[in-house]
């Protein structure tokens, strides 16, 4: 009887230790955006790549943040900014939002909204880290519709080949943090006013 109880207690301790170990393993969002640090994932596409992908309009993409994991009021999320440049337009698209752990520990999600119509338009990202310093970003949303900033009058699906990006981790200084939206302490009041 005593031996059975000791065996049961040993199994319970083993399960508890395994559960704690599993919870302590950093998920994809925490690996991509380490707590208390700055982050920058970026990629710029050269002429050769763009010539081989004529339906791709994004020429560079950056996802960045400072002093990560201060993202109130959504617990467990980190504020971030997305900056995209295009081959068919000189003006960059700057969007602010947040990233968080996905439904699975190996996935993360992000949502970025434009200044105009943030309740209707957005760029969503389903992300994974195929390598520690590479963010694979699957994009949801149509770049042309979002950058117009107007409610779409009809839906004709995604109109470009800009749905998957492999972004490399870079020093924070390599990303173009928009003036007035970030300080060394994190997002500013101006940033928070643009996030719904």
Image: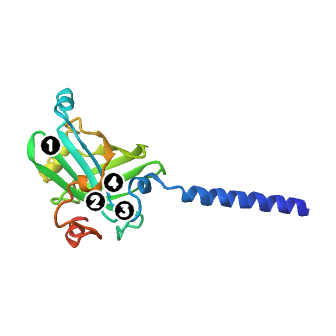
Residue 37's tag is 3
Residue 166 as seen in the image, left or right of residue 3: left
Q: Quarter-wise, where is residue 180 in the image?
A: bottom left
Q: Nearer the viewer, mark 4 or mark 3?
A: 3
Q: Secondary structure at mark 2?
A: strand
Q: Which residue is label 1 attached to?
A: 86
Which residue is label 4 attached to? 110
**Residue 48 location in percent, x, y?**
19, 29
Q: Residue furthest bottom?
A: 189
In the image, is residue 41 above or below residue 10?
above
User: Is disc 4 placed on a helix, strand or loop?
Assistant: strand
CB within 8 Å, label 2 to label 4: yes
First in sequence, mark 2 or 1: give its number: 1
Q: Which element is circle 1 on?
A: strand
Mark 3 vs mark 1: which is more N-terminal?
3
Say which residue appears at 22% left-offset and 67% top-offset.
191
**Residue 14 in the image, given as x and y percentages of width and height:** 71, 57
Q: Residue 97 shows which numbered tag?
A: 2
Q: Position of residue 84 (x, y in %)?
A: 19, 48
Q: Are marks 3 and 1 in contact (CB under 8 Å)?
A: no
How far is mark 2 from mark 4, CA to CA? 7 Å
Which residue lies most toward the left here?
Answer: 90
- Say whether residue 122 is visible: no
Mark sitting earlier along the chain (2/3)? 3
């Amino acid at each position: 009887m005593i031996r059975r109880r000791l065996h049961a207690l040993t199994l319970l301790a083993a399960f508890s230790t395994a559960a704690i170990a599993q919870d302590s393993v950093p998920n994809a969002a925490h690996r991509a955006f380490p707590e208390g640090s700055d982050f920058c994932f970026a990629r710029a596409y050269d002429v050769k790549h763009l010539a081989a992908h004529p339906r791709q309009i994004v020429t560079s993409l950056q996802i960045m943040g400072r002093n990560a994991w201060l993202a109130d009021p959504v617990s467990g999320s980190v504020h971030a900014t997305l900056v995209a440049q295009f081959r068919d337009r000189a003006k960059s698209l700057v969007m602010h939002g947040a990233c968080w752990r996905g439904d699975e520990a190996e996935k993360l999600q992000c949502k970025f909204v434009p200044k105009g119509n943030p309740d209707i338009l957005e760029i969503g990202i389903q992300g994974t880290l195929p390598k520690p310093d590479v963010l694979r970003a699957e994009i949801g949303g149509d770049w042309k519709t979002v950058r117009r900033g107007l409610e779409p009058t009809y839906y004709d699906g995604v109109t470009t080949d800009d749905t998957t990006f492999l972004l490399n981790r870079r020093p924070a200084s390599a990303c173009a943090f928009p003036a007035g939206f970030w300080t060394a302490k994190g997002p500013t009041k101006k940033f928070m006013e643009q996030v719904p």
